[in-house]
Structures are given as structure tokens and as C-alpha cells.
Image (cartoon, coloured by chain):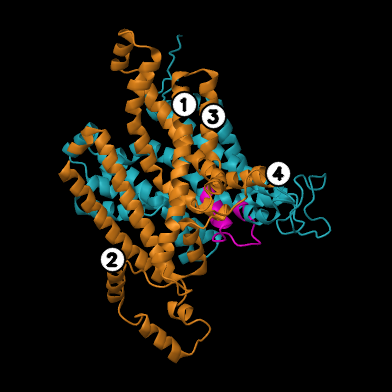
Amino acid sequence: MSFVEVAPIVTPRARRRKILRRRFLRRPLAVVGLLVALGFIVAAAFAPWVAPYSASATDFNNILSHASGKHLLGTDELGRDVLSRIIWGARASIEAGVLSTLLAMVVAVPVGLIAGYFRGWPDTVIARLTDVLLAFPFLILAVGLSAIFGSSLTSATFALGIASAPALIRIARGEALALREEDYVRAAVANGAGDLRIIARHVLPNMTSTLIVQATVLIPTAIIGEAVLSFLGLGVQPPTPSWGVMLSDAQSYLTQAPRLAIYPGLAIFFCSLSFNLLGDGLRDILDPRTTR
Amino acid sequence: MGGFLLRKAGAALVVVFLSSVLVFVGVRALPGDPAIALAGENHDPAVLAAVRQEYGLDKPLPVQYVKWVWRALHGNLGLDDRQLPVAHTIVSRIPISLELALLSVLVGMVIGITAGVIAAVRRGKPSDHAATTLALVGLSVPHFWLGLLAIIVFAVDLHWLPSGGYVSFGSDPIGNLEHMVMPALVLGTGLSAVLMRQMRSSMLTSLGADYVRTARAKGLSERSVVGKHAFRNSLITVTTVVGLQLGQLISGVVITEVIFVIPGFGRLTIDAITARDYTLIQGVVLVTATGYVVVNLLVDVVYSLLNPRIRVS
């Protein structure tokens, strides 16, 4: 009896994912970025279990102390453990960074799609409104919106999301505009496919790589944005820990304990760097010109 | 060329008009009653009513808007909470921020262009890797933290530079520059990182182009090939990048002025918002948006001058 070998059926999508995964693993910087970013996300999610102390546990006998066995990064001006505050602070940054980007995407992608795909007067209105919002620098918009919404992590997240949306709308609109001219879209139209089907099956899936790359650029901007808002007193309010608040508090102790300004800043830096590296890697592997 | 400019100017005008509406509505959306803020300690309803009438707060919103725009066009942006004319405060602060912005752009361009060119010419070599890594670091580092670090090292530890404040150029040029060095360097690094990457990328493209091969085949020295041909065409990239980074620059100026306690326009914005000084906020944000639109228009003009293909579109 002879056995007939049947090749496993691999869908084109699975094959592409395998290629992308291999390409990604060939880029050590991107892998490092992914791991560090995941580390911050895990720290933020599991802060109650990861952090040695609570963020507000004060110890007035032990203020401004240097690194020691009990406090790996020392204590701040109220005797709170710096390492724990940094771990708890990751919550504010990751939440603001990731959620605001998600909000921006949820708002911007449909709006940009409608403008770019349908053109006509919706496009003109949306394009003008986006131009107006883009007339305000990101930070001014974020600060202004924070002032309107009040000072809290939630309002900072909303403010950052809305401030990030206009640029994303422009990008989504550009993508939709280009994609609707593609041959396969015209073929679908000729076959009598309705708009919704074309958008769902042809336009939107082909926008995902650009959108993913944009998200990885927006997240670090939002992380730094949250830090700036908290630094200015417009975001997270004490005693909730946030890296920006820690930096702001550290300003009064620059001569006595400069390390209080160094640690939170390093946290912001590594967090945003990791997402940037991840984004660079993703952009590289999703580029059609890449061969490795 | 004229038609292109006119269309761009027209679009800019529409954007400025719509932004003014947004600013007006936005300030009205701020929590709190402006009448109470203006009346100060006195919460007597009769006093509040009188304040409302005096400031025209009882009129319908569109009327208030028109009055505000009319006055603004005549240079009258009202009085802030301390009864000082807003327009005057803004005008006195703008040159300071402008100096900071210009110095930062200078720093950014010098560092970014040099690093980008070196990285492109020495592609793949250690200096390229070093420059590219530094650029990535410069992109990810929060600049207000960099400012704090600079203060720690140069002001607190080494005592080389003052930790903040401002001295006008007219009264003490050296002191002025001393105060501006750190802020300009801190702000400039952000721009230089973006510029370096773009410069490297566009130089690599230019250096592979046919006209460069021709120049080399003609026997021109490498320096003149790089210097004249590739470099000049990358200037367009630089203009685009600087134009795109303007928003970041303004945001950067704001936060840098807060850290280095520079009495500029950026700090004025933050102070106004934190103090809920409505009139001041309105004036400041309006000027910011208008200025931003105008500068973007100027960048578009410069870009179209450099790249004739754009004028036709």
C-alpha cells in the first residue's frame, strides 16, 4: 500500500503571519522593545503584587534616604519607597498611553475612512475641522482639554486621545483615499459589491499595517504627554502616583536628592523607548520593500 | 505661483476663523462662572449682575463672539485678572519665546544635519550606528526630564550655568546667552533627532541617484559630490521636517519655559490656564493658533519656492 502525502493546507494569511514573525525575530532591537514594553504593561497590571510597598506608605523616620536593602531605590521626601512608586506610576502612564491611543483610533479611523472613501461634502467638512484642530499644537490642545475636563487620570486620557485624533484622521483619510483607487476595489465595485462590504473586506484590512505602526508612535507620545500633564498639575492628582508628579515633586529637592528626578525620568525614557523600538521594528517588517 | 499662494492664504484664513470660534467656545466650556471670577470675593447677586452687564456676559454668545473678534482685530484683547492689557503682556513675552525657538531650531539643524550627513556618507560603519542610536534616544527621551538633568549637572553640580530665569539681550548679551544655552540645547535635541533620521534617509536616496553617479563619473571629488548635489536636494527634506515639527517645537517651548522659569509666551499659556484667567487664556490661545497657522503658511511658501513641482498642484 502506498501512502499519499498530503501537504498541510496553509492559508495565505497564516503564511504571511509566519513570515512576519520570522522577520520580527531577526531584529533584536524590536524584540527587546517588545519585551521591555510588555514588562511595563505587566508591572502596571500587577502592581499590587509586584511593588514591595504601597505607593502612599510614608515613613517619616526615613526620608530622602539612599538606596538600601529595604528600599532598592531609596525613599522620597515623605519616606515613600521610590521603586514602588515607580511601579505604581506605570499604571498611570500605560493606562493613559494605551487607552488614549485606543480612543484616538476608535474615533479617527471611522471618521477618516468616511472622509477618504466617500469624498464629497463629508470629506470637505471633516478635512476643514481636522485642519482647525491641527492648528493647535498637541500640548496646547491637551492642556486646554484637561483644563475643561478637570484634573484626573481619566480626563488626561480623554484629553490626550482627542488631541491625538486629528493627525490620525488625516492618515486614515489618506489611506482610504489611496485604497479606493486600487484595482481590486474597482473590481469589487464592478461586481456590484456594496460600500460596506468593500470597506470591510478590502479597504479596512489593508489599512491595518499603517494603523498599527501609527499606534506604536502615538503610544510613547501619549506616555510623555501624560507625564507632562501630571508635571504641570493637570493630570493625575496626588496621592495617586505618576512619573510626571514624581518629577514635579523632585524639582524642590534637586540639590539634596537629584536621584529623585533621575529615576522617574529613566522610567519614562525606557517605557517610551521600548514602544519606539517596537514601532520601528513593526514598520520595518511591514514595509513591502523588506526582504529579510 | 500667485494663485497657489492665494488659495493657501484663503484656506489659512478659514482655519484661523474656525479656530477663533473653537477658542471662544472652549474657554466658555471651562468650569466656573467667569462673572464670579471677575467679581472676586463679592458673591452678592446684584454685584454679579452688574459685572455681567459690564463685561457683556449677559448678551447672547454670538454677539459676545463678534464683539470679541472685532476688538481683537483692533489689537484689543481685553484685560486679564490683574487688570493688565492682555495684548501688551503677550507682545512683551513673544520675543523671548521666539529667541528660544530660533536658537533651538539652530541647534537642532546644526546637530541634526551634520549627524545625518555623516551617517549617510558612512553608512554601515560604527559612526552611522552611533548616530542612529543617538537619534533614537533623542526621540524617546522626555525633554522636560532632559532639562531637569541639565539643571542638575550644569547648574547644581558644576555651577557653570544658571538654573533658570531670563536676562534680556539688550541689557546683558552674555547673560542672555548663558540663560538660553541649556533650554535651547534641550529643545534642539528633539528636533535634531528627527532631522538626523530624515536627513540620513534622504541623503541615502540622493546619493544613489543617477545625477550623482554622473558627477562621480565626471571625476568630481567626493566632497563636492556630497556637498553640492546631494546636500542641496536634501534641503527640501529639512524644510518639510521643520515645518512638521513646528507643533512639537511650540509644545517644547511651553514645557521648557516652565522648567527653566523663563518668562516667555509658553509659560504665560500655562499660567493662564492654571489660574483660570479666561480673558488671558482666550487671547493667548488665539494668538498661538493664528501664529501657528501663519508660520505653517510661510513654511508652505518656502517649500513651494524650493520645489517647483508643488506650485502646480
Which kind of residue does numbered mark 2 sit on?
Answer: Leu
Q: Position of residue A21 (x, y in %)?
A: 49, 27
Relative to A37, is B62 on the left or the right? Answer: left
Q: Can you identify the residue that label 1 sits on?
A: A18
Q: Residues within 10 Å of mark 3 (few under 14, many from 20)?
A: few
Label disc, if present, on residue B90 of the rendered structure: none
Query: Chain letter for cyan?
Result: A
Q: Position of residue B46 (x, y in %)?
A: 43, 91
Q: Can you identify the residue that label 4 sits on?
A: B157
Q: Position of residue B295 (x, y in %)?
A: 33, 48
Q: Residue at x 30, y 45 (%)?
A: B298
Alpha carbons under labels 2 and 3: distance apart: 48 Å
Query: Chain letter for orange?
Result: B
User: Do the residues at discs 1 and 3 belong to one chain?
Assistant: no
Q: Can you identify the residue that label 2 sits on?
A: B73
Please identify, in this view, whether the residue under mark 2 or under mark 1 is nearer the observer. Answer: 2
Which kind of residue does numbered mark 1 sit on?
Answer: Lys
- The residue stretch that appears in magenta: A223-245
Alpha carbons under labels 4 and 2: distance apart: 49 Å
Please identify, in this view, whether the residue under mark 1 or under mark 3 is nearer the observer. Answer: 3
Q: Are marks 4 and 2 in contact (CB under 8 Å)?
A: no
Location of the C terminus of chain A (image quadrant): top left
Q: Residues within 10 Å of mark 4 (few under 14, many from 20)?
A: some
Number of numbered discs on residues: 4
Q: Residues within 10 Å of mark 1 (few under 14, many from 20)?
A: few
Q: Are marks 2 and 3 in contact (CB under 8 Å)?
A: no
User: Which subunit holds the residue at mark 3?
Assistant: B
Relative to A130, is A237 on the left or the right? Answer: right
User: Which subunit holds the residue at mark 2?
Assistant: B
User: Which subunit holds the residue at mark 1?
Assistant: A
Alpha carbons under labels 1 and 3: distance apart: 29 Å
Alpha carbons under labels 4 and 1: distance apart: 53 Å
